[in-house]
Image (tube, rainbow, N blue to C red):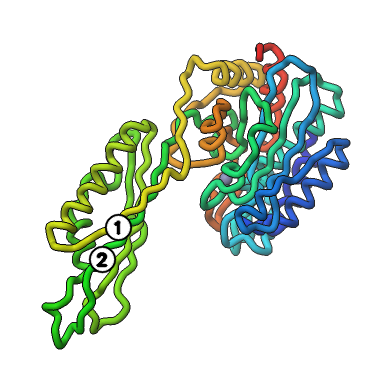
Amino acid sequence: MINRDRLTESFLELVRIDSLSKKERDMADHLLKRLREMGLEPYEDDTGSKIGGNAGNVICRVPGIPGKPVLLLMAHMDTVDPGIGKKPVVDGDLIRSDGTTVLGGDDAAGIAVILETIGSLKEDGISHGDLYLVFTVAEEGGLFGARNLDISKIPADYAFILDDEGPIATAAIKAPFYNRFKATFKGRAAHAGLEPEKGLNAIILASRALSEMPHMGRIDEESTSNIGIINGGIARNIVSETCTVEGEVRSIHEDRLEQYTKEILDHIREVTEKQGGHVEIEVERMYPGYNLEESSPIICLLKDAAKKAGLPLNLHATGGGSDTNVINGYGIPAVDISVGMDRVHSTEERIRISDMEKACHFLQAIITTALTYNR
Ligand SMILES: [Zn+2]
């Protein structure tokens, strides 16, 4: 049986562990121990050394009935700042932070729900197919854990990432592809008082390119862009030689992402060259997007499981990126499902115990419904 008190204790224990991105050592050790106590054989991969962190992803197979769909269940171990010394406050059904840090329910709630659900399946002897549990590092700020995962060791048919907000049985089934770019404008330095005419001001180059930038902000219903960082100049009395501008473009549709990115960068180049300046541009695809059809098997599975758990299914598109993007990019259909977290990435973060409990029932329904599906 899903045990509310055990779930609550487990969640409180998890959020009391400091686990900032790339500093998940204590959390990884805690999870390795918990999984071993459940009679499982978890291991840690080498992602930590690859990304300059102190822990790798924690991975664990839960053997089940062979020949049935294999499910990957995921949550991330890291939390955002301010996240040191988290002191959860239990207020009836609500758990919140004490107001000085985030609560860290993003994503300790996902971990707690997975552990409680697996624990109760084992306890009650409920049948299931093979399950893989993956607790990633450094999801925040770059999805580094998921991107460094050796997916060849995880032969999953479907993946469920427990890292969404909203009522339980909310699932993100669309998320954007994401490009980041950095433009370095190159001007010419000169003394600003003695011979400014010999200089070419990189800050002015950048500002002219930015002032009439096409496609800024909300581009269309499923595409956005932003300029997030600008840096330039070294002193008031020097005509600035360099200026860097960093931005991003997102779209649910890969072709539109590429089109908008190209038009933005072409504009930057054109305007800069017209002024006699030069700009160097780097573009990087940070992660792929996903766009699951409502008729796809994983969505059918979600619908059947929601019906079984008696919860209204709420499918939505998200503008953010999560480990779900990366797993879809590996070719495994993946959805991001809600565990009830609320006001995440703020010191007002909170979560309801009853929502986490419901999330366990929904996850159990997903696991048992999958048994009725073919691989
Ligand atoms: Zn998260």
**Residue at image point 31% right, 54% down:** 281
Q: Do the residues labelled 2 and 1 touch (CB within 8 Å)?
A: yes
Check disc 2 and report its element: helix, strand or loop.
Answer: strand
Name the residue nearer the viewer: 252 or 332. 332
Name the residue nearer the viewer: 247 or 362. 247
Q: Mark 2 points at which residue?
A: 186
How many callouts does the rendering have?
Answer: 2
Ligand 1 is in which quadrant of the figure? top right
- Left or right: residue 310 versus residue 179 is right
**Badge 1: few (under 14), some or many (20 or more) residues near its Cα, within 10 Å?**
few
Queried on whether the Cβ of the residue with tag 1 lies below 8 angstroms from ligand 1, the answer reads: no
In the rendered image of this protein, does residue 253 appear above or below residue 346?
Answer: above
Q: Which of marks 2 and 1 is nearer the N terminus?
A: 2
Give the amino acid at mark 1: Glu
**Residue 181 in picture, x, y percent from top left:** 36, 51
**Residue 73 in picture, x, y percent from top left:** 67, 33
Q: Can residue 143 be seen in this view?
A: yes
Q: Distance between the residues labelled 2 and 1?
A: 8 Å
**Residue at image point 61% right, 21% down:** 306
Q: In which quarter of the image is residue 357?
A: top right
**Residue at image point 59% right, 56% down:** 102
- Left or right: residue 193 versus residue 134 is left
**Residue at image point 69% right, 11% down:** 372
Give the amino acid at mark 2: Lys
Queried on whether the Cβ of the residue with tag 2 lies below 8 angstroms from ligand 1, the answer reads: no
Check disc 1 and report its element: helix, strand or loop.
Answer: strand
**Badge 2: few (under 14), some or many (20 or more) residues near its Cα, within 10 Å?**
many
In the rendered image of this protein, does residue 69 appear above or below residue 221?
Answer: above
Q: Quadrant of residue 155?
A: top right
Q: Name the residue under label 1.
A: 280
